[in-house]
Amino acid sequence: MKRPELVCPAGTPAALRTAVEAGADAVYCGFQNATNARNFPGLNFTPDEMQASVAHAHAGGTKVLLAVNTFPTAGRFDLWRDAVDMGARFGVDAFIVADIGVAEYVKRTHPNIRLHLSVQAAASSPEAIRYYAREFGVKRVVLPRILTVPEIKQLAREIPCEIETFIFGNHGLMVEGRCSLTNYVTGLSTNMDGVCSPAADVHYDKQPDGSVTTRLADFTIDSFAPDEQAGYPTICKGRYHAPNRPDAYYAFEEPISLNLSGLLPALIEAGVDAFKIEGRQRSRAYVKSAVSAFRKAVDAILAGQQPELADLLALTEGQKQTEGAFKTKKWR
Amino acid sequence: MIYVNSAAAGGVLRDLMRDSTHNDPNHRAGLTRFLPPLPLFVLQPLLGRIVRRVARDNPSLFNRLGPHRAARFVIDPLGLPFGLLLVPNPDALVFCAFDRRSEPASDARIGGRFLDLMGLLDGGADGDALFFSRDLDVSGNTEAVVCLRNALDDVEGSIAESVAGMFGPPGRAALSGLRRMAARAASRKGDHA
């Protein structure tokens, strides 16, 4: 049985060290700027931190995958070029990219460093993936979370590169790399500035009855009753009123997290090479719990044992979890 | 030297664990409602010492605060008879207690059970999970709160542990007790989920 790589989030150096200690085969992280899709305040790595963290990870036998997975706009390419060059200098093991210009730059200037295609590229067909592999030498594709396990199995037979799938965290059903909802509301772009629902525009208003209303800029996203579980303040997970609906409803996605604990054997059998845990914006505590749980589960499966699946419900958004489209296209 | 009366401390600690989700700033839960108002002047030098030690040991913490170093954070440990004001400005650090009847002006407000807030400092709790479960309330400048959360989460080891260490064996014993209670509370919560 092929041993899948466990790819874990690291939003800070401390989270990176936690992931290494918890058994990550690889960590993914980014610099403190718009070159990565988790450009959140107070998060990510300075160049000095990145250099030290790469050394720490390598000393622990863990690879570092540098997320440079946003889309440069005209006149700003220097930022992405510098991120790539610094990553190469620090010895990262792969670049995670979405933009074809960044991919071309990596291929041309650092041909010995692996290229992984970010989920932000939203490549889900054999034709699209083969294009990236042929033109840029992409070695691994991170698949959008919209394919069933049988579809992934079929895809694995038709592409010349490795497959990485998300197994835990954000459900992420919007067409990634194309979503402009944040841009529409705040003027900042998830795809070009790396900020989905920038915190400066997020407001929580607690009402006298204990309910909480969440807003992004001037748009109300949701209102949670006092005893109701909450979700992230993103437009895609908002609850809205519509003329043909008697009550407010989740028009796009629900606040719910992906958890594929129960599908790990099927994913390995389908040919998946790497399992990704989402959550660079989450805490060390999250990293420790999620990475440890999946490390144990994967090791048990590889040893031919029944995996003991830890209860990660407390970490999930809205305290709800789903196997999403991986199980069936009719998950809702 | 600070002496801890374990029986009394246990009573107060149990009191801190009580679920208190309302937002009445004058609310005093459980046993604390029968206690006379705490003379805050006793606490202030202690809190000042704690914040100076944390700042001294973790200077890089301030880098993650970005433009929010001068932000005023009110921290509301539900169940305690007082609130806390934090201004994480390395040049003019403020960490002090205030009477709930006169809450100071702030840029952001963070409220939660004492043990949950301690879990965040301890690196043992996830802020997003506490928010999802409605155990953490945030209002005001969300960006400042996110910066503070990320800054604290990047501190190596446990802030709670280093603070407890300042008070020697009694401090460490109190922290161990709090952690056990937090673990039991989390376990009970899991059972009911």
Image (cartoon, coloured by chain):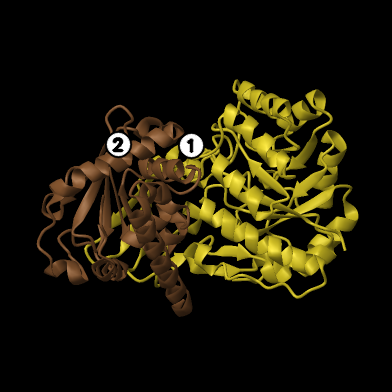
Chain colours: A yellow, B brown
The residue tagged 1 is A188
Q: How many marks?
A: 2
Q: Residues within 10 Å of mark 2 (few under 14, many from 20)?
A: some
Say if residue A170 shows up in the picture: no
Say if residue B52 shows up in the picture: yes
What is the CA distance from the residue labelled 1 to the residue labelled 2?
A: 24 Å
Q: Are marks 1 and 2 in contact (CB under 8 Å)?
A: no
Q: Residue at x 86, y 59 (%)?
A: A2
Q: Residue at x 79, y 52 (%)?
A: A163
**Looking at the rendering, which quadrant does residue A276 occupy?**
bottom right
The residue tagged 2 is B71
Measured from the top left, where is residue B83 in percent x and y?
22, 52
Tell me the quadrant of the picture where the N terminus of chain A can be found. Answer: bottom right
Measured from the top left, where is residue A136 in percent x and y?
82, 34
Nearer the camera: disc 1 or disc 2: 2
Specify whether A236 is left or right of B7.
right
Q: Residues within 10 Å of mark 1 (few under 14, many from 20)?
A: some
Q: Nearer the viewer, residue A251 or B59?
A: B59
For badge 1, the amino acid type reads: Leu
Specify whether A223 is left or right of B104.
right
Subunit that carries the residue with mark 1: A
Tell me the quadrant of the picture where the C terminus of chain A can be found. Answer: bottom right
Considering the numbered disc 2 on the image, is that residue within a helix, a strand or a loop? Answer: loop
In the rendered image, the residue lying farthest to the bottom is: B192
Considering the numbered disc 1 on the image, is that residue within a helix, a strand or a loop? Answer: loop
Subunit that carries the residue with mark 2: B
